[in-house]
Image: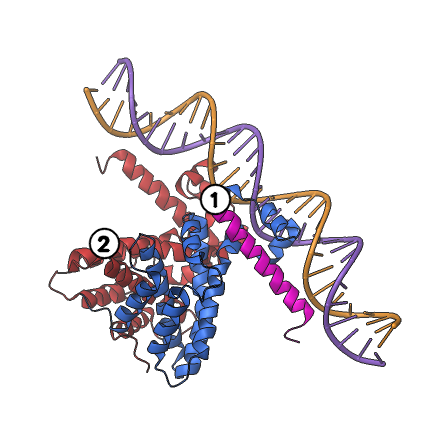
Chain colours: A blue, B red, C orange, D purple
Amino acid sequence: MADGLRERKKAATREALCRAALRLTVERGYENVLVDDIATAAGVSPRTFNNYFTSKAEAVAHRHRHHLEQLARKLHEQPADVPLWVAIATVATTYFGGDEHLPDPSWAEDIGVVAAHPAVYAEFLKASVLAEESIAEVIGERTGADPFYQRLAAAAVGTAIRVAIEEWRHPDPRPLGRLIGSAIEQLTAGLPTP
Amino acid sequence: MADGLRERKKAATREALCRAALRLTVERGYENVLVDDIATAAGVSPRTFNNYFTSKAEAVAHRHRHHLEQLARKLHEQPADVPLWVAIATVATTYFGGDEHLPDPSWAEDIGVVAAHPAVYAEFLKASVLAEESIAEVIGERTGADPFYQRLAAAAVGTAIRVAIEEWRHPDPRPLGRLIGSAIEQLTAGLPTP
DNA sequence: GCGTAAGACTGCGTGCCGCGCAACTTTGTC
DNA sequence: GACAAAGTTGCGCGGCACGCAGTCTTACGC
């Protein structure tokens, strides 16, 4: 059974844990949050925390992965006759740029704050790469391309979003959606030197 | 003084530490290596280890960063009249593909083995991104392009190498140099769907 | 329904890690 | 040669990740 009570409870706990981890870290700073605090905030024992995440940093970074996987879902829902990169550009700019679609509005800012800690930053990158698997899969469905292309294209998408977020936090006055769009545009143009 | 005894000693210690970390981890597996072991192997006190690296995983992944920064140096040495992406493709394929240029020949295999551990993998990605700063700088010198382009192009190079390494380890029978070349070629062509 | 097996949560205990602190030693400068 | 600056080291501590075993909850066949 893919959707029993068990599964939903687990998903809810994981959700509660990573939300609490991100929120508390934004509020107090990474060093001032104990895993006990996160566990308590999620209504679960400290020991259970490590049944879901292998490190505190991983929990904090997990929401980023979640959102990238949402992106893969949205991409999957795009009509099949839309060219791949048009679909990607559309989804990425609206999901991350269109402020109303995002479940948590301050997310982009939050991860920027949180990723200031080296350990969290590393996990943020890992989360991004893990989510690329989902994106690669969708690209495979759409194009039927070889696995190498799937992974490379998915990685390019992840990279575009990452660089755009970093540029946005620099800060670049342009809105995030526009920066992501610009990054994807330059990539699909073959990165010609301007 | 940029090159006193002090500086050289520090560099030597850092080198010894991350070499030992990588070697021991390849030999015994990440879990079976203590920081004490690494410190001892490098001829330094355990406490000193954390004066150079903030975590064991960081030390293990550091050689990857080192090699990417060597790549940036090689790129810098390329004649200025060579087009950017030709220079990048040349340097990347010869440095990582041409087996004789690499200081440690088994490096590509080693990082593959070592990155099996999630914590190390995260640090491996972080190392890659940190090295991108050096690459971005060189790209800036060569092209005079805006910072956004610099970072995006550098990130694309890092991504191409990462995906090629993962593909190579899958394993794809093609040699690593050729995979990197293919990745860069597809990127500079704008990732057309095959 | 009901019993049983599988799975999840929890408390406890342990070993390792990262780092602050305060000596001590080495390197660089005048 | 003396003084300042920087690096190394031993000590100690708080926290983290996880193995283990017991308890409670969910799933499923009858």
Look at the picture and state if C11 lies above or below A193: above
Instruction: Count the numbered circles shown.
Output: 2
Which residue in the structure is indicated by mark 1?
A29
Task: Tell me the residue at 46%/60% (across/down).
Answer: A64
Instruction: Give the SS element for disc 1.
Output: loop
Tell me if I can see residue B161 in this picture.
no
Answer few, some or many: residues within 10 Å of disc 2's Cα (few below 14, many 20 plus, some between 14 and 19).
Answer: some
Magenta run includes residue A129: no
Amino acid marked by disc 2: Glu
Q: Quadrant of the C terminus of chain B?
A: bottom left
Instruction: Give the SS element for disc 2.
Output: helix
Q: Chain under label 2?
A: B
Q: Quadrant of the N terminus of chain B?
A: top left
Where residue A177 sits in the image (x, y, percent)? 34, 65
Which residue in the structure is indicated by mark 2?
B137
Question: Relative to the observer, which residue lies in front, B186 or B100?
Answer: B186
Where residue B117 sits in the image (x, y, percent)? 50, 58
Q: Furthest-left residue in view?
A: B81
Question: Relative to the observer, which residue lies in front, B146 or A93?
Answer: A93
From mark 1 to mark 2, how far is it between C-alphas?
Answer: 31 Å
Where residue B150 sits in the image (x, y, percent)? 24, 59
Q: Classify residue C3 by image quadrant.
A: bottom right
* Residue numbers of the magenta segment: A1-28
Are dots 1 and 2 on a single chain? no
Task: Tell me the residue at 47%/72% (across/down).
Answer: A134
Magenta run includes residue A12: yes
Tell me if I can see residue B129 in this picture.
yes
Q: Which mark is residue B44?
A: none
Q: Chain under label 1?
A: A
Look at the picture and state if C20 lies above or below A50: above
